Image (cartoon, rainbow, N blue to C red):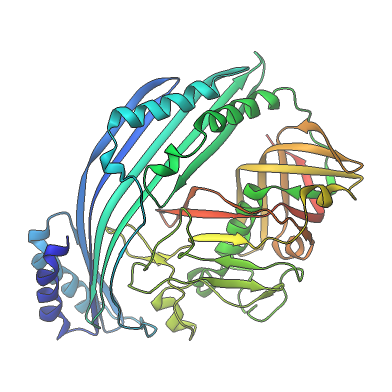
Amino acid sequence: MEENLDLFKKIINKIGTNVDYVDIRAVEGNNTNILMKDGKIQEINTGLDIGARIRVLKNGAWGFAFTNDLKKLDEISETALKISNSLSGDVKLAENEIIKDKVKTSRKIPVSNVSIEDKKELISDANKAANIGNVVSTTISYSDSESQSVFLSSEGSSIIMDETRIGLFLNAAASSGDAIQFGHGSIGGSKGFEVLKEADIEKFGRKIGEKATRLLKAQSPPSGKFTIITDNDLTGVFIHEAVGHGVEADLILQNDSILKDKIGSKIGSEIVNIIDDPSYDGFGYYAYDGEGVKTRKNQIVKDGKLVSLLSSRESASKLNIKSSGNARSIVSDQPIVRMSNTYLEPGDMSFEELIEDINEGIYLKGSRGGQVDTGKGIFQFNAAESFKIENGEIKDPLRDVSLSGNILKTLNHVDALGSDFKLSVGFCGKSGQTAPVGDGGPHTRILEAMVGGSS
């Protein structure tokens, strides 16, 4: 892709004299996707992807065009120009420093150097480990990618990124004959094959199979308000869904967030500190966003106060702030405001200290989905697995436990934070687009949380 720099510069120079702004982003990459169902490989997709897009800003309106054929760049540049010429709007871009950089994701074992057979063997090991107890079915999805991208703008930025990402996702279903329960887990990162090779795959698979089996004997949960402990995964899901989406500047501008006009206001207890950090070593890592903005650690909430938002250059301009570097998309889509690695900062308590004063509570682990209304400020999540807490001890397992409530009230009821920290691996969907993200935090104690059963 780097060899096409002169071509990209030529097109920008040609178009740039007639518009307010233009940028080109092009990506070339190898990727592999493998799907195993019940120990049998169902699908293997591997190949080379290439594509380029051009954005033209004129008269406050975007012209956007994409192609899989670099020979058609001239053609799509004219298309983008025609689109912008036919429209008018109020788009302006927040200022951004001119960047000239070349970055490469660290990796010990390039995924392209690992054979399909070796990848299949690792997936098979995970499958065998998960098939224990009452497990009757497993589904494993493996994906990896290596890509080189180029970003050039009429402002003078020129950025080349060599990136890699890998993930393994396992689901196990256990049955007792009249009931079915599920276990789920994932491993991944923005590195090479070493992420999986250095992991304990047998332990990873076994824990998921054990979880699905354990849930078959779990009791139905009580309903009402309880002191709860959320594990790293569910803490992350809550922070991502209930807070992360609420601070996305495009939703703020659409009047679809309870956090609109809350900058500087207290939205949580004083121990709540929330970060979104694309530069952090997690599944949501990237060095520069889709608009060439250098990424950094963005503190969203500090000591319970909302202090910043996540933004693109366009949304930042409308809010008179600096872009946070959160404009993301695959190359064929227009970048929109997205989270990266979003987490609650840990505290200093051990797990034992978190639960020792709880006479009657619930420990919720993991997530199996839910929903959030950022405009109304309410949420509902379903925990993957839960346990009773009685007199400071973890007791009987519970199944189908839901957590619901008001976002701001729940944040203000965050009472204590564990000293542990974990960032999970996943994907976030928004406006028809999907982006790799990390979310997490410590074990978290929340007072007066509304708990109930879920189907």
Q: Quadrant of residue 37?
A: top left
Residue 190: horizontal and vertical position, in percent? 41, 52
Which quadrant, please, contains the C terminus?
top right
Residue 40: horizontal and vertical position, in percent? 38, 20
Which quadrant, please, contains the N terminus?
bottom left
Residue 51: horizontal and vertical position, in percent? 20, 56
Q: Residue at x 74, y 22 (%)?
A: 217
Observer able to see residue 177 = yes
Q: Is residue 277 above or below residue 142?
A: below
Q: Residue at x 33, y 45 (%)?
A: 109
Position of residue 184 in the picture relative to residue 323 (left or right): right
Position of residue 120 in the picture relative to residue 21 (left or right): right
Q: Residue at x 34, y 43 (%)?
A: 144
Q: Quadrant of residue 293?
A: bottom left
Q: In the image shown, does 295 or 240 lie closer to the viewer? A: 295
Q: In the image shown, does 100 or 368 lie closer to the viewer? A: 100
Residue that lies at the very extreme toward the top in this rendered image: 177
Residue 400: horizontal and vertical position, in percent? 70, 35
Q: Residue at x 88, y 48 (%)?
A: 356
Q: Quadrant of residue 336?
A: bottom left
Q: Is residue 21 above or below residue 376?
A: below
